[in-house]
Amino acid sequence: MATSTLNPIPARTGWSGRLSAGESFRIIDVEGGQCADLWVFCADDPREPLSAQHTRVHMGEIYPRAGWTFVTARRRPVLRFVEDTSPGLHDCLVAACDSARYELLGAPEHASCEGNLLIEAAKRDLPVTFAPQPINVFAGFCVHDNKRLELGDCESKAGDAATFEMLMDGIVVVSACPQDIVAFQPGGPTDMAVEVLA
């Protein structure tokens, strides 16, 4: 019988787990309107992350959706996006929030997605010193026809989920985005969860 493990992610914090090829996980927006930054690092060489820029070329599209296969910086398939119960808005263009971003916004001590990544990386001895481009799950970011980038609102509802399958062994890191100055998270930073499916 299939089992699962639910891992709460309190608002503004992160989570990480080592998953094997064939395992799946579900990112859940617990309260709605919340973005999650997602990273995957290959277990056999953690210096090889999931690469958004390589994946965009691999897929010939710029916005992640169910059916996408994500590849690493060495163009190896690492993750498959298998199911989406949200409105389907996701991004892989906008950088993770970081301490420099908040310093420019006048809040130098603010929690950040890069900070959450570095905390989780230290727990797992990952050689990470900065945030690679994340997959911004549930983020309503878009480039308009006039080439203007807009950080649009997250439109996910409470309980919406995005499910991914591991295509190789890897370390998954998820950050419940702490951003509350640039107002794309209508309810402010809220809780998320990761359900590991087995």
Image (spheres, rainbow, N blue to C red):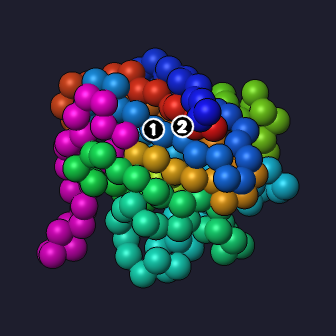
Q: The N terminus lies in which quarter of the figure?
A: top right
Q: Please, what secondary structure does the residue beneath circle 2 have?
A: strand
Q: Nearer the viewer, residue 108 or 9?
A: 9
What percent of the width, then of the height, locates residue 165?
Answer: 57, 53
Q: Badge 2: few (under 14), some or many (20 or more) residues near its Cα, within 10 Å? A: many
Residue nearer the viewer, 122 or 83: 83
**Mark 1 and 2 residues: CB-CB less than 8 Å, in contact?**
yes
Q: For residue 101, say whether it is visible.
A: no
Taking 115 as reference, is 143 above or below it? below
Residue at 59 percent across and 25 percent down: it is 5
Q: Is residue 143 magenta?
A: yes
Q: In the rendering, which numbered label is found on residue 174?
A: 2
Q: Position of residue 116 (x, y in %)?
A: 57, 30
- Between 80 and 43, the residue placed more toward the observer is 80
* Residue type beneath disc 2: Val
Q: Is residue 96 left or right of residue 73?
A: left
Q: Earlier in the sequence, mark 1 or mark 2?
A: 1
Find disc 1 in the rendering and name its residue. 27
Asked if residue 81 is positioned above or below residue 28 in the image, the reply reads: below
- As for residue 155 lying within the magenta part, the answer is yes
Residue 178 falls in which quadrant of the image?
top left
The residue at the far left in this view is 146
Give the quarter of the image for residue 122: top right
Q: Which portion, as a residue range, is magenta?
A: 136-161
Q: Is 188 placed left or right of 179 in the picture?
A: left
